[in-house]
Amino acid sequence: MAPTRPRIDIESVFRLTELADYIVPFTVRAVAELGVADQLVDGPRPVTELAEATGAHAPSLLRALRALAGKGIFTEVEPEVFGLTKLAEPLRTDHPLSLREAYPLLEPDIEAWAHFDHSIRTGQASFDQVHPEGYWPYMAAHPHDSARFDASQQAATRLELRAALPAYPWGELATVVDVGGGNGAFLGGIMARFPALRGTLFDLPHVVADAEPVLQKLGVAQRCTVTGGSFFETVPAGADAYLLKRILYGWDDDNALRLLRAVRAAMRPDSRLLVLEPVVEAGDRFDVGRLYDLLLLAMVGGGARSREHIERLLDAADLRLARSVPTMMFPILEIVAKTEA
């Protein structure tokens, strides 16, 4: 019996073509890097003016903007004259939730995605296929790429702050240590909202070296201690709360357990550990955490875990999950010592 041929659903074919496309994402990133949206703050402008202001090739910029306008990103208000749309507004540098720096064209990342089938076949980071030293050592040795990565994380942090600030009683805390806190944008954002809060930013020395301007801009530098070190070895002790924002899921179980034990050793009996990251759940519901999960798989071989998996790791580190607080993005897992006072 001959196999039944699938029914042709042309709408699904076109939809899949749209979803599989990487032309539009790369064009968005290139236009964001040029700063085109910043040139349209005061209204539509001819593409020749935009090209001159951004250092672009006018005919090529025209082609790029027309492609994006077809997706609702920018609009061609008259021939070769473009303006902003709702989707283009967040590409402005001055937007409260600006995403202009969220999408850098990082060559090592792009090379890794070109080998992503390796990750799906093996469960190993495709990044290591092109840069065997691994993601974090690569960034430590390439300060320009590291700075652009940090800027992209700061853009994501603005969204995470919007989600986390109203979801958790941060005002109950007097001292917080942000473990692996990057340049301090997240911790500084919380401290700016709660003036009585004192913080410690803790990350690798080359990472926290760029924190001072961020903390100064947020007006919290006088209340924030910046400390460099490895969170696998020791963590500043005695704080009310410890933050791990999108850190734990970047490591395999052995290293995640090392990290949790280092934090546990620093905690007082009544301290809290707050883990902000995706938690794997079954079903078809869209969750931005599932995209982060694949990003981690490609870059470092890590990934999101189920609640049960996380609880097993916590138990091995003498910790327990007290509650999970939902937010607009990732849940906040409030964790305490198993022998909590």
Image (spheres, grey):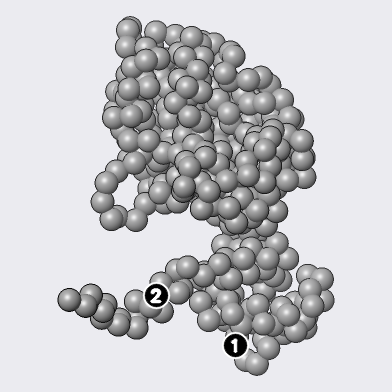
Residue 82 image offset from top left, x and y in percent: 64, 82
| Residue 32 in sight here | yes
Left or right: where 217 falls relative to 303: right
Spatial distance from mark 1 to mark 2, Cα to Cα? 27 Å
Question: What x and y, as percent, mark residue 216?
Answer: 70, 35
Q: Residues within 10 Å of mark 2 (few under 14, many from 20)?
A: few
- Local secondary structure at mark 1: strand
Disc marking residue 307 = none
> Which residue position is annotated with label 2?
15
- Out of 3 and 234, give the one closest to the viewer: 3
Q: As drawn, is 47 to the left or to the right of 94?
A: right
Q: Nearer the viewer, residue 43 or 320?
A: 320
Q: Residue at x 63, y 31 (%)?
A: 220
Locate residue 309, reporting x and y percent.
33, 29
Residue highlighted by disc 1: 77
Q: Amino acid at mark 1?
A: Val
Q: Earlier in the sequence, mark 1 or mark 2?
A: 2
Q: Horizontal and vertical percent for residue 48?
A: 77, 83
| Placement of the C terminus among the 4 image quadrants | top left
Q: Give the residue displayed 47% in from the left and 68% down from the top.
A: 20
Residue 151 drawn above or below residue 43: above
Q: Residue at x 58, y 13 (%)?
A: 234
- Is residue 189 visible in this depiction of the protein? no
Residue density around tag 1, few if under 14, some if 14–19, many if 20 or more, within 10 Å? few
Q: Quadrant of residue 286?
A: bottom left
